[in-house]
Amino acid sequence: MKDLLDTVAKPARYIGGELNARPFDMGAKVKIAMCFPDVYEVGMSHLGMKILYHLVNDTQGAACARVFTPWPDYADALRAAGRKLTALEGGLELSAFDAVAFTLPYEMCFTNILETLDLGGVPVRSDDRGDGDPLVIAGGVCAFNPAPLSPFIDAFSIGDGEESMLDIISAIRDSDTRSARLVALSRAPGVYVPALHDGHTIITKRVVADLDAAYFPSEFVVPYLETVHDRAVLEVARGCTRGCRFCQAGMLYRPPRERSAATLAAQGESLIRSTGYDELSLCALSAGDYSGLADLSAALTKRLSGMRVKLSLPSLRVDSAIASSMGDAFETDVRKSSLTFAPEAGTQRLRDVINKGVTEENALRAAREAMAAGVNNIKLYCMIGLPTETEEDVAGIAGMVRRMLNIADTNRRPRVSLSVAPFVPKPFTPFQWAAQDTIPAIQGKISYLKTRMPRSVTLHWHDPSLSRLEACFSRGDRRIGGVMEAAWRGGCRFDGWTEQFKPELWENAFERTGVDPAYYANRERMLDEPLPWDIIDAGVSKEFLREEYLRAVAGDVTRDCREGGCQSCGLNAGRFDGRCPRAAVHSL
Amino acid sequence: MRLFIAFEKSFALRHIGHLDLLRVTQRALRRSGLPVAYSQGFNPHMLIAFASPLPVGQSGREELVDVTFEGYVDGATCLTALKAAMPPGLPPKLARAVSDDHPKLMAMLREASYLIRADGADSLAAAVPAFLARKEIPATRVSKSGSTRVDIRPMLRELGYIEALSAFHARVSFTERETLKPDLLVRSLAEFAGAPEPDTLIERVRLFGEKQGFAAPLMDC
Ligand code: SF4
């Protein structure tokens, strides 16, 4: 009588059929399963996934269906019933697709890739796949170091996906056998096929030069369940020029490009009309830097007047006057009366090391202004274990929090919460050579911080063993892939979810495979040491990153290239006719 | 002005909860471009009210919602616009204009009818005549605050077995003071027949109000 879905939590994760979901064309020559290696509510909030889903479906001869990793209850129920995971559209098992494509948004979802493939009836290792099996493709931020996942992924798409996806579709459409398709893929620019790679050819990332011309969907699928970001989203810009030295996205998404206010306003209107969302959020690594904000806000006001749409920015930048430029054209969201910002470090010295161009003074001023405007909650984000950090820097976090508590002249105090994350060195950042603190060192710093923190402050911290794992994945090689498989076979999945993370099983997997996590996480790399991701050209040059690392250690700041002129990060050399398309300022 | 709108919550969407349904309906109304009225005040919200939230796991053949519009909207226009705006699993069926002072759906609600598919329904069916012949049907209602004994016989208006569908059809009272939930009904029947409590799939077929002393579809009340 009952279906499997009647027995699991939140069955709406698995039923599909939402507003604007596309009917699946069974007759399409190229069938792609677009997979997100996390649960539905997270995956449905991911902009890249939305773009690619609609892009493939809008391409002649191609059909795309969505897949999200089933939560453990449903995964176990499927296995117990001897059933395979099917895509939300069309009901095909993963093994019946031509390609199974994964977005790789963060390292802690890696085991979910193996879990999803296995549940869908696809052999998890590339070597075990044959002619009847789909190609397994992956792209996104974590594809820039493909090594740890290369035992499992047939082809990596490096860089912006909009144009690359069309090449991938053609490669699949124009060949019939698995091996011919792999050869065709390996010839596409920006695609890395581990099985066919010679070990030294450089794979250059794809860059969409003109965001205005890039594909963007006119509608989003509107979920039944409330998702993490349940609203319409515009990508106002890609790339960031601020040059924070720990930030991988800031380096990977260079060169900075903006969409014109006119294009965005049209996209915003069509999204609002097709979805019925009452909230439109502007998204970019640093949305407050978008140069056309005033124009965009005016154009959207005109197009959406009377539709009661709230315009929201994901992060209020400390040193910009976004709020005033937005005017009162849009309804403000009264529920969100909190100010979030990330000074990342507790002293000016360390903020200079990481090149975070925020001073405590402007942070305090922004907080004071926000308080005056009725904001009561202040959320701070800091890292510990940053290169060159001393006890004084850790104590500095507590000092800054104290001063934040005392900003109001009256007896009204803000409610302050502080999130502390251990620093994780990432490929293609100036800190890619740096060591991560050991788990005991991180624990020591957290306890030290706790003793110095005023009691009224809520302190959250990331599990240091999770951060160590993230460091192993991010700078890992193929051997880390082996550890990952062992851990997954031992029962690890959804590692990014605290309640699902099983550190003992991971310890066990490292031991059994004879891999020492400290070798990957806690060792400073030599500047001339070959790195697993050297075969990838991410745009920023190794020379620039090395130079930046040395400047960091010396405490020298590097200016934002929109203000201080080109810093020759590498994007200017040998492409875009030698001119970096940085921050071309658009107007209506 | 106000319109009563009837829509179906299809079997495939039985797992969608009431709050999710509310959000989807609000979005569909916004998408439809119909001039829905909003409340005044600091945090304005759409003026819509469902007759009765449908529990997670149940589908509904004729769920009702009361929507207030700014200005005049005729039923046919509303239905056409909503058909294009609602997701496939929630097709709108009917729309009917009512006056501004018409009673609220929830206040008019008296009864509900259900189609109940249950494991081993055919064997339970044999017990129905004797079950209905009882003067009193004591049952245990379990809630968060504990369990209470109630007599469900007065709340049970109709109970029959439809062989072609292998399902029970039941009409029960559905007011604030007296509501008989279909799962409690099935549990009591199973208990009476000496059978274990079966797994069920429940569809709410229709909501009823009262017209001239008789039960009438709520949509017409
Ligand atoms: S090439 Fe120059 S202008 Fe372009 S992103 Fe790099 S530093 Fe900035």
Image (tube, coloured by chain):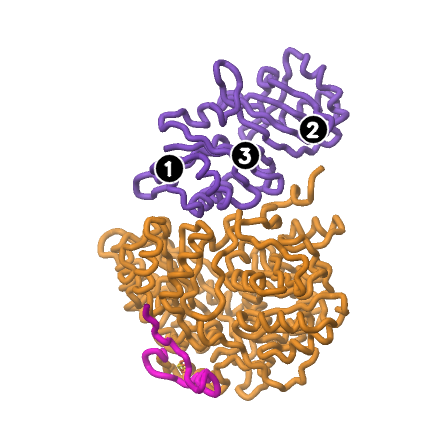
Q: Is residue B207 left or right of residue A380?
A: right
Asked whether the residues under the numbered discs 2 and 3 touch, taking CB atoms below 8 Å apart as contact, a structural biologist would say no
Mark 1 / mark 3, whichever is N-terminal: 3
| Chain that appears orange | A
Residue at 63% in and 86% down:
A200
Residue at 77% in and 69% down:
A130
User: Disc 3 on helix, strand or loop?
Assistant: loop
| Chain that appears purple | B
Question: What is the crowding at mark 2: few (fewer than 14 residues within 10 Å), some, or many (at least 20)?
Answer: many
Q: In the image, residue A58 lies at what x, y percent?
A: 56, 62
Q: Are marks 2 and 3 on the same chain?
A: yes
Residue identifier under label 2: B167
User: Disc 1 on helix, strand or loop?
Assistant: loop
Q: Is residue A232 above or below residue A362?
A: above
Q: Amino acid at mark 1?
A: Phe
* Distance in Å between CA atoms under marks 2 and 3: 19 Å
Q: Of the numbered discs in the image, which one, if any, rests on residue B69?
A: 1
